[in-house]
Image (cartoon, helix red, strand yellow):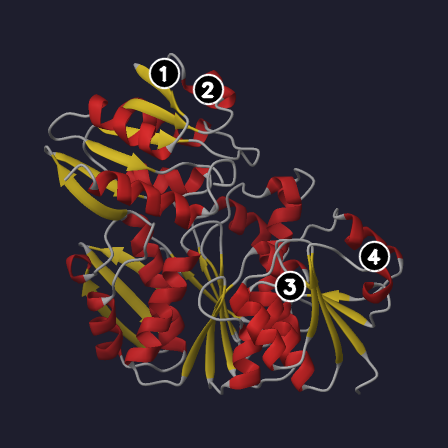
Amino acid sequence: MSNRRIVVLGGGESGAGAAVLAKQKGFDVWLSDMGAIKDKYKQLLDSYGVQWEEKCHTEEKILAADEVIKSPGIPDKAPIMQKILKLHIPVISEIEFAGRYTDAKMVCITGSNGKTTTTLLTYHILQSAGLNVGLAGNVGKSLALQVATEHHDVYVIELSSFQLDNMYEFKANVAVIMNITPDHLDRYDYKMENYVAAKFRITQNQTSEDSFIFWEDDPIIAAQLKNLKTEAKLLPFSEFNHEDAVAYTANNQMIIDCKGEKWSIDRNELSLKGLHNLYNSMAATLSASILDIKKETIRKALADFQAVEHRLEYVATIGGVKYINDSKATNVNSCWYALESVNQPTVLILGGKDKGNDYTEIEQFVKDKVKAIVCLGVDNAKLHAFFDGKVATVVDAGSMQEAVDKCASLATDGDIVLLSPCCASFDLFKSYEDRGTQFKECVKKMQ
């Protein structure tokens, strides 16, 4: 096998992990990154004797590959990818590669919103039950690195549409789709059907032994289900008591009716509040139920789970104004859930790198709840074109400090300042984490 050449594109968490596993399995491995590789990944690659390069692509080495493992952030339109595809060199994801070398059960979660919280909550429940469980994908450590260096019986994996794009033989024992709303359309030729098809790849290869959990009231999921050919057990959840829903609400109770057992938990006992978090709790509970976790364990874990950083994260109350960090809201639907959960007059921070956003989804909430908008971005023209005249005050800010200062001057006792940007962070910040951290630091300086 050692003469087979694996090329890994991208030297971050996913790529470095894939390279280590490939090296361990006896492949001839070359890792290439057009950007700079972090020191911790260089050290990891060096410790396993993986050859690598940064800030360039040596084409003759890359195009000599028998197979390419591509980091999810690299689009097919990238020049090196065009050359790889022209030569018909197989391209796979790190998750696809790792799946070849483990027989662990896979609980895989995708969706436009809620997937991180649902993934972490599912992991928390399984850990609480004493399972030997790994956390991978968009959160946790690289799946490939864990397969190479650890052993787990179950993995809980958050999967983006980009990761699903290059998965072919991989199979989810439990597949979860939280919801589907327009996002990343710039990567899918601005065609919603391409994005939806990418999300539904999570169900491919499932058999009658497997389960597919989904939000029943999502119109896009409902439409796609009509054409879905799958043997998997369908486990829909809903806010409402539909005939086929196996998780729903009634009398402020979350009801679970799965695997021949029906039980409930008072919504007030759930550590995660709001309608969107109810769905996250339902999906995580169903995943755990399929794995035969006892309801008592699930109930306790749902009550003591700690919320996700940068997702509707309470920061501080200053001068009667509550500051909330929802920097993880990188699309319009995430902001919709944030606005759905607030009930006080709101000063809303929007803006960043627009991914083809349609703001009509939040228009009514903005009219009903938002007293002022602070546009935080390099180019705020699209925000002004949509929101000017619909909100009394729409102002611009060129930095987080300026945005927080303007919010503080616009908000009064009893208001909420909500950072829920609807956009990617890459115009002014390194990441949504960087954006959220700067927000928290600016707010805490006011205390």
Residue bearing mark 3: 229
User: How many marks can you see?
Assistant: 4
- Residue furthest to the top in view is 389
Residue depicted at x 28% and y 31%: 404
Residue 290, label in figure: none
Residue bearing mark 1: 390
- Callout 1: SS: loop
Residue contact at pointers 4 and 2, CB within 8 angstroms: no
Residue 284, located in which quarter of the rendered image?
Answer: bottom left
Amino acid carrying label 1: it is Lys
Q: How far apart in space, not on screen, are marks 1 and 4 (Cα)?
A: 47 Å
Residue contact at pointers 1 and 2, CB within 8 angstroms: yes
Instruction: Tell me: 313 left or right of 332.
Output: left
Residue 36, located in which quarter of the rendered image?
Answer: bottom right
Q: Residues within 10 Å of mark 3 (few under 14, many from 20)?
A: few
Residue depicted at x 26% and y 56%: 249
- Image quarter in which the C terminus is found: top left
Labels 4 and 3: the sequence-earlier one? 4
Residue bearing mark 4: 85
Viewer-closest of 257 and 313? 313
Q: How far apart in space, not on screen, are marks 3 and 2 (Cα)?
A: 40 Å
Residue bearing mark 2: 386
Is residue 172 visible to us here?
A: no
- Callout 3: SS: loop
Q: Nearer the viewer, mark 4 or mark 2?
A: 4
Q: Residues within 10 Å of mark 2 (few under 14, many from 20)?
A: few
